[in-house]
Amino acid sequence: MMTIVAHDTLVWFAKTFGLIYLVVLSIVVLCYAFWPSKQKEFDDASASILKKEDRPWQ
């Protein structure tokens, strides 16, 4: 027989673990973005859009 989970239980679970999930995901993204070994990669990516700016688009 299938067990039905109460709506209140699902809401509590989503609010609790959804918040934890988003906080952990945000910390991981910030660590990735500010990791010292990634600085050259991000600097190259930010400068690459400006390369060949003095010529017309082809």
Image: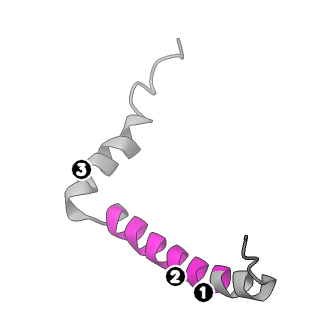
Which label number is shown at residue 45?
none
Please state the horizontal and vertical placement of residue 2, each as a whole percent of the image: 73, 70
Between residue 27 and residue 56, name the one nearer to us. Answer: 27
Looking at the rendered structure, the kind of residue marked 1 is Thr
Q: Amino acid at mark 2?
A: Ile
Question: Residue at the location (71% across, 81% down)?
Answer: 10
Would you say 12 lies left or right of 52 here?
right
Q: Position of residue 3 (x, y in %)?
A: 72, 76
Label disc, if present, on residue 40 of the rendered structure? 3
Q: From mark 1 to mark 3, how far is it between C-alphas?
A: 37 Å
Give the secondary structure at mark 2.
helix
For residue 53, what is the image quadrant?
top left
Tag 2 or tag 3, which sits nearer the N-term?
2
Quickly name the residue at label 2: 20
Asked whether the residues under the numbered discs 2 and 1 touch, taking CB atoms below 8 Å apart as contact, a structural biologist would say yes
Tell me the distance, in whole angstroms, between the alpha carbons under discs 3 and 2. 31 Å
Span of residues in magenta: 14-32
Residue farthest toward the top in the current orientation of the protein: 58
Tell me the amino acid under the disc marked 3.
Answer: Lys
Principal SS element in the magenta part? helix
Label 3 crowding class (10 Å Cα cut-off): few <14, some 14-19, many 20+? few
Image height check: is 5 above or below 43?
below
- Under circle 1, the secondary element is helix
Can you identify the residue that label 1 sits on? 16
| Side of 48 where 57 appears, left or right | right
